[in-house]
Amino acid sequence: MKALADLQLSRGAVNFVEEERFQALLEMPAPDRGRVREIIAKSLAKQPLSVEETALLLAANDPETVEEIFETARQLKRNVYGNRIVLFAPLYIGNHCVNDCAYCAFRRSNPDAVRRTLSPEEIEAQVEALENRGHKRLILVFGEHPRYDADFIHDTVQQVYAIKVGHGSIRRVNINAAPLDVAGYRRVKEAGIGTYQVFQETYHEPTYHAVHPATTRKGDYLYRLDALSRAQEAGIDDVGIGVLFGLYDWRYEVLGLVAHALHLQERFGVGPHTISFPRLQPAAGVHLDEDYLVDDEDFKRLIAILRLAVPYTGLILTARERPELRREVMAFGVSQIDAGSRIELGGYTEVGDAQVQHLEREQFRLGDIRSLDEVMRELLVDGYIPSFCTACYRLGRTGEHFMEFAIPGFIKRLCTPNALTTLMEYLVDYASPETRAAGERLIAEELDKIDDAKLKAELVRRLERIRTTDARDLYF
Ligand code: SAM
Ligand code: SF4
């Protein structure tokens, strides 16, 4: 078969990954403390770091400097980003796939994969189950297959938005699916999607080719590298980038992510909305080289360094990770997590709460299978405000991370009040008594911190309306 790269699908794509330069940057000696402090000061001033500055942070190896980087990430989280954590859930729509990614159980050469695409009735049942647990934001996940084309994604998104049970509704639908062409992205945008995510998996081209056969659609490295530029061209300005950590040297991948963020920022005036950093998990029939698996210590470092490098970008920590580790790294500036996740097709209704994981039906193994309510309670006890806010994108305030930090008072005036009203909705409609009590306590504490009397009075009024009436979705 002719390699897809030869068909020039990726004509016009820009390769912003400079392999030789990246390798040279990773060989730099550790910087002295003074230089690290200069870079830290730049981060604290909310300025994006260059690829070279990021490489210097990666080279810093002595325990005290590493601790200083962790502390800066915690400080940025506390002082700059606040204590909100946005919650979402993944919904797997179909796992037919024409690709053969070496790490994924959905790969076409896996004879044991149970293939399935949810029917409209099954989608309805899954979405109702998610709404009944309190979810407001979903990410729809698709294999790569002609049946999951732009029209199919568009129609699925529209269907999901239309499903309502009780006070439940899905207010933001994000997508993780194969790259599309510009016309395809335009079509998907018409359905009112939130973020479109495409993970590069690895920015190291030789590794990319080793795990993605050239005869498959995904084998075209440049077409994938250019995927989110095409999305931007089509007018989708919330895009999510990511790496599958464990395929190649994590330090190189961090440089790739930073280069990608800077590239989008330069070319379109808006950087990525989010960065995801999944770590490779065990999956059916997958036997990969273990040389590049990232241990917990390095995983913490990579999150902290990303936090410092890309101030205006949300960081997504997924349920692939174990609860204890999620709790710890949350403090490093993570802004979104999924909770109550099931990645088996139909998993929100069909496996009940038994939470048994069937590797032959899943893409990989999850590390955190606690319910949304349990995760909410832990967040509340730890002093975070779990938020289901979707106001910005619904009011056309896309690129909100940028505005949050660039517009004085934005977080205080809009983000925190919206987090609290959506939290109140959850407490009233879905929470267990323990979670409700923890939530009411946190809301009272947060109200005490608001010094704008007019705003506070309006917020108290809205919270009381939610508590005592059917009024919902009262965003600022
Ligand atoms: N099929 C589309 C694609 O490949 O871009 C989108 C969906 S794919 C199911 C979503 C992501 O799952 C992939 O981009 C990859 O990073 C991640 N993934 C695949 N296998 C994994 C594994 N064994 N462990 C952790 N994440 C994995
Ligand atoms: Fe298919 Fe995506 Fe899995 Fe690759 S990662 S085999 S493209 S579902």
Image (tube, helix red, strand yellow):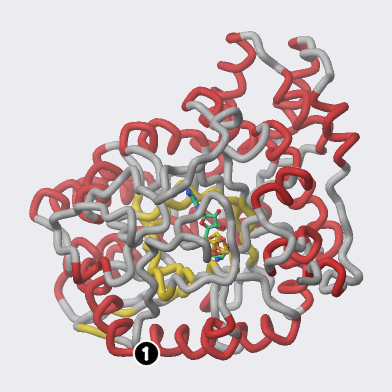
Is 11 positioned to the left or the right of 136 in the image? right
Looking at this rendering, what residue extends furthest in the left direction?
433
Q: Is residue 257 visible?
A: no
The amino acid type, in three-letter code, at marker 1 is Ala
Q: Position of residue 78 (x, y in %)?
A: 49, 36
Image quadrant occupied by the C terminus: bottom left
Residue 424 position, x and y percent, is 25, 63
The correct choice, above or below, for 142 with respect to 198 in the image is below
Say above or below: 134 vs 381: below
- Does the rendering let one see residue 363? yes
Which residue lies at the image location 50% right of the left edge and 34% below the top edge?
332
Q: Is the N terminus in the top left, top right, bottom left or bottom right quadrant?
A: bottom right
The x, y position of residue 294, in whole percent, is 54, 30
Q: Which residue is mark 1?
A: 162
> Residue 450, percent across and down?
39, 50
Left or right of 464 in this view: 254:
right
Quick check: 53 left or right of 455?
Answer: right
